[in-house]
Image: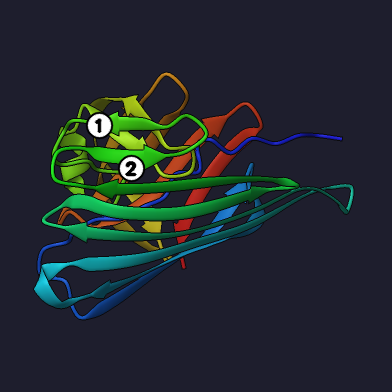
Amino acid sequence: MVRMKFKTVLFLCLLYPGLAAAQAWQFDVSMDGKAIGTHEFVLDEREGGQLALKSEAKFNVKFLSINVFKYHHLANELWQNDCLKKLDARTQENSKATLVEAKQDQTMFKVSAPTPLEISQQCVMTFAYWNPKILQQKKLLNPQTGEYLNTQIARLGQETILVKGQTMKAERYKIHTSQFVIEIWYGLDGEWLALQSTTPDGRIDYALK
């Protein structure tokens, strides 16, 4: 039996300038070229300039037609002015469940997770790939585990990629942490287009539907 770990499956939320009342993103997710599931994000604007995100991922990895790994992540995040205000997330990896709750109070950002912590920084961001402002951050919160990770981010240059069957020019970046490496592509307008991560279990790709 193969035990898969998806610490690199990181979940996305941001405050995006010019956002409409509601937006949705749907991704097909593959590992080493084989479809394993989907990840959907729905972002709604609330009164007072707050944004509420629902993120849901469902993966099912098979070996010889046998299910070896099931993964379900459901997260609700509340954002304001590019800062995370509240997070409630549940991740189910086969029989293992992980709960992460976080909230900004007047002086601290408090995270309830397998390893609880308090963050003195007033503005905390997750790995919010579709907000280019994450590229300016030195630390990012992983909503799946509740860990606040040091990051090193590098621009790799411009290239042409395939998005929804069409070629598009994109800027490529690498996000490096002590636990994983993510590569991400943005359109010239700053829109997030694609993601790729190499893990001990294989290469994971997110492709817009």
- Quadrant in the picture for residue 208: bottom left
Q: Where is residue 143 in the image (x, y as percent from the top left)?
A: 41, 44
Figure quadrant of residue 127: top left
Q: Mark 1 points at which residue?
A: 119
Q: Which residue lies furthest to the top in this view?
A: 178
Q: In this view, does 200 lie above or below 25?
A: above
Task: Using residue 139 as the reference point, say whether residue 34 is left or right of it.
Answer: right
Query: Which quadrant is home to the N terminus?
Result: top right
Question: Which element carries disc 1, helix, strand or loop?
Answer: strand
Kind of residue indicated by mark 1: Ile
Q: In the image as oriented, which residue stretches furthest toward the front?
A: 106
Which residue sits at x=42%, y=37%? 146
Graded by Cα atoms within 10 Å as few (under 14), some (14 to 19) or many (20 or more), the crowding at tag 1 reads some
Q: What residue type is labelled 2?
A: Phe
Name the residue rendered at 18%, 30% in the picture.
120
* Residue 158 visible in the current orientation: no
Q: Mark 2 points at which residue?
A: 127
**Nearer mark to the viewer, of 1 and 2:** 1
Residue 2: give x, y in percent of width and height.
80, 34
Mark toward the start of the polypeptide (1 vs 2): 1
**Residue at the limit of the structure toward the bottom, as seen here:** 21
Image location of residue 40, percent across then percent down: 47, 66
Lateral position of residue 61 relative to residue 194, left or right: right
**Residue drawn where x is 89% and y is 47% of the image:** 64
Q: Quadrant of residue 172?
A: top left
Q: In x, y percent, where is residue 102?
A: 35, 47
Label 2: state its secondary structure. Answer: loop
